[in-house]
Amino acid sequence: MPLTAVLTGLGAYLPPRRVSNEELADRFDTTDEWITSRTGIRSRRWADPGTSTGDLAVEAGHRALKSAGVDPEPGAVDLVVLATTTPDHLCPATAPDVAARIGLTGAAAFDISAVCSGFVYALETAANAIGAGRARTALVIGAETYSTILNPADRTTSVIFGDGAGAVVLTAGDADRPGALHGFELGSDGTQKDVICIPAGGSRQRAALAEPAPGDEYFAMEGRKVFLSAVQRMSESSTALLDRIGWPVESVGHLVGHQANVRILRAVAEQLGIPAERAVVNLDQVGNTSAASIPIALADAAAASSLTVGERVLLTAFGGGLTWGSAALTWPDVVPA
Ligand code: UT7
């Protein structure tokens, strides 16, 4: 009989430097009023130069292990999966270094690249390893330093994204235990790959052969197109998952969506028929942290004790690729470290 992955630890780490809308209004042709009304974001954190995604991931990973009561030592964790769009290097993956720095040398460790949906992809990957009996304990991290890829000439993306990391520990357990993961649904549409992309730096535009066209080394997004797809795909993916696992939408206690834009979160909740006050929102303080956004939101919600142990929780995300994904779990009995 397949085992169930149970969320047994949660942690998040944000770099200390808080960047307010007012500070950005001094640097870009923008205003606090535009940013707040169009996105809901009031401030975000940006890592100082020299701080990498891996550095943030190590902190979040340590905190999640502490929250789970797992000592960071070789053998304690079988699998480390890191979701990120901003790895420390193109090669090798960031996860093995993060695992080693946490004290988990020897664990299987790899990165997952699904942009803002990365954490849900990573969560399903780790849960499947546990379900198949290939891992007993897994550390799943979402970590980003978007400040390193933002185009200083693009006011739209520069005001949206923030840096940070969140992590969860999954342990093999029973499906009736609070924190149990009850199902996933993932999807993609590569025909829309260009609406969120970094054109240069990969094998398509090789860095060594030519100078990239101005701006091609930075993250770019067609915001309006992405907005509409995000609402549609997150709503459809959530509905497909709830139908498959037999959870009526009224039974969902809270929706924890990818923190892209408060208008997107409200629209998804409305399409699903979930009251807006049951949609967890923390983007006002952290901005869009891409693959880190759901685990940071989970850790913030746990710290605020705003969810009830055992209640049904729906996660849903959308991002470049295009990719999307949803996950269903019951709220765990954990205190974030
Ligand atoms: O996380 C991965 C997935 N990403 C997302 O889900 C993001 C989805 N997209 C969005 O959240 C929104 O589309 C944005 C927040 C990116 C943009 O909001 P919008 O309401 O779609 O604005 P828009 O792009 O249609 O631009 C409206 C106006 C434009 O001016 P005109 O053409 O109407 O004169 C923009 O030039 O707002 C202007 N604008 C700005 N003005 C002040 C764009 N960025 C800014 C800015 N400050 N920072």
Image (cartoon, rainbow, N blue to C red):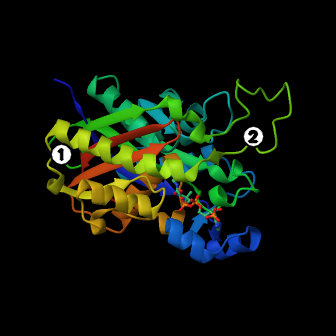
Between 330 and 6, the one nearer to me in the picture:
330
Left or right of 337? Residue 312 is left
Q: Please, is residue 211 above or below residue 11 in the view?
A: above
Q: Residue 251 or 225: which is nearer the viewer?
A: 225
Where does residue 176 sit, x and y in percent of width and height? Answer: 14, 43
The image quadrant of residue 175 is top left
Tell me which numbered mark, 1 or 2, is placed earlier along the sequence: 1
Image location of residue 146, percent across then percent down: 63, 50
Residue 82 horizontal side relative to residue 311, left or right: right
Q: Alpha-carbon neighbours of circle 2 within 10 Å: few (<14), some, or many (≥20)? A: some
Give the quarter the ligand 1 occupies: bottom right
Count how many numbered circles sit on residues in the image.
2
| Foreground of the two, 148 or 270 | 270
Q: Nearer the viewer, residue 212 or 143?
A: 212
Check disc 2 and report the residue beneath it. 216
| Closer mark to the observer between disc 1 and disc 2 | 2
Q: Is residue 18 above or below residue 76?
A: below
Please name the residue that numbered disc 1 is placed on: 177
Please name the amino acid that badge 1 sits on: Arg
Q: Residue 131: x percent and y percent?
A: 27, 27
